[in-house]
Image (spheres, grey):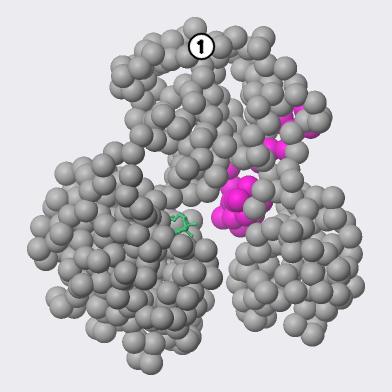
Amino acid sequence: MTQAPPFSQLPLSAATLENLSRLGYETMTPIQAASLPIALAGHDLIAQAKTGSGKTAAFALALLARLDAKRFDVQALVLCPTRELADQVTQEIRRLARAEDNVKTLTLCGGATMRPQIASLEHGAHIVVGTPGRILDHLERETLSLGALNTLVLDEADRMLDMGFFDDIAAVARRCPKQRQTLLFSATYPEGIAKLSQQFLREPREVKLAEQHAAAKIRQRFYEVRDDERLHAVGLLLNHFRPASTIAFCNTKQQCRDLVDVLQAQGVQALALHGDLEQRDRDQVLVQFANRSCPVLVATDVAARGLDIAQLEAVINVDITPDPEVHTHRIGRTGRGDDEGWAFSLASMDEMGRVGTIEKVQGRESEWHPLSELTPSGGGPLTAAMRTLQVLGGRKDKIRPGDVLGALTGEAGFTAAQVGKIQVGEFSTYVAVDRAIAKQALQRLNQGKLKGRKVKVRFLDEAAAE
Ligand code: AMP
């Protein structure tokens, strides 16, 4: 095995290298090692990369290297399939841009109102991240101009094509200057990728990584269930294996609702993610799942699209999907990076045909286990390690993660280890704290001050129930 290469072998500024080491990025991931030299040299690029591979930094470092922060024009545009991905990309770019002064990154996605986006654009931005439809909308209204653009990134291009964005991407690309660098990232290469590449990339270099043995890191187990014991079996799995983070996939929204009811009745903390949720509720569910305040997310495939949850310990197929590709996609969400993951599937007699198709596609036989093997492993029903506090104040109030951490570890007297993920939104800040100190933390934040001002703080799980 060759050693993973350090970032210092790349032509990056000292400030950037220092920031990377502060972020804990010691060595490059394979996709970074393969694509950064090409991208930094200014070539167009097609790179095969999945979420979790470090692909965001692979293109973000390249576009940041060419950015002139003194020039207040949009110099880089990243197109993403979904709002969640766009938010994640923006956050990663912001982290990586910390080395430079005042790089402004803006997210522009559909589903949000236009007016605040237009107002933000009037203030200017260096980097725009967004979904193709909304970006095109801004271009057509001339609220966004790409005259000074030098880098165009198509992130998760295959999924954008899946979602029918080809024409929108093409229309956006045509509005970019001809002299530019285009970087395309995609996990798979359906036909449309070649078409995009021919039309919008110039002599692209291709980066493909040898298939990693992801399958070996996913331990798959099948359980035969009767339909009337299926939902109960999910609770058995959770209380037996006690994974810290699980997505349970259902084929229908109704099944999602029913499962959450059953789990909650058993005392297992679970939240549903399906298409009927309002955007705000959806965001709050995801915040709680990602920061470990909720161990189980119950989702339909459509709702889970575009989610990138690091360190998912288990995936449960509550129903067997009729599409073996969907099955592969579902279980591929666990066992990422160096972690091992569990994939459990519950199948009734009626679903054995589907299991057969999955076995054929995966080229291996399923490992069956009896439900009777599952015994609660003590410690009561599965609950989360953390609880989320919602501070009613965000970026608009100039709150930064450090302010919240400072308030909790300073006057309030908690240790940094008791504080989890802190996410600052436009109007709200979400902070995960150790469940054992959650009540005290709430009280002290409500009594104290943040940025010299009093703030209102509440439990997100209680706010959501209102
Ligand atoms: P991505 O595939 O871009 O979604 O990245 C997956 C995760 O890996 C993100 O949380 C990044 O912050 C992190 N990451 C990216 N590059 C590195 C690196 N070279 N070393 C350590 N972590 C990294």
Element on which disc 1 rests: strand
Q: State yes or no: residue 395 in magenta.
A: no
Q: Residue at x 24, y 83 (%)?
A: 147
Question: What's drawn in magenta, residue-wise?
Answer: 261-290
Q: Position of residue 26 (x, y in %)?
A: 46, 62
Q: Quadrant of ligand 1?
A: bottom left
Observer able to see residue 38 = yes
Q: Position of residue 133 (x, y in %)?
A: 34, 62
Closest to the observer, 337 or 157? 337
Closest to the observer, 297 or 435? 435
User: Would you call the spot at circle 1 few (<14 residues within 10 Å), some (14-19), or many (20 or more)?
Assistant: some
Q: Residue at x 44, y 81 (%)?
A: 15
Looking at the picture, does residue 258 appear above or below residue 65?
Answer: above
Q: State yes or no: residue 286 in magenta.
A: yes
Amino acid under disc 1 = Trp
Q: Which residue is mark 1?
A: 368
On the picture, is 367 further left or further right than 228? left
Q: Residue at x 83, y 64 (%)?
A: 414
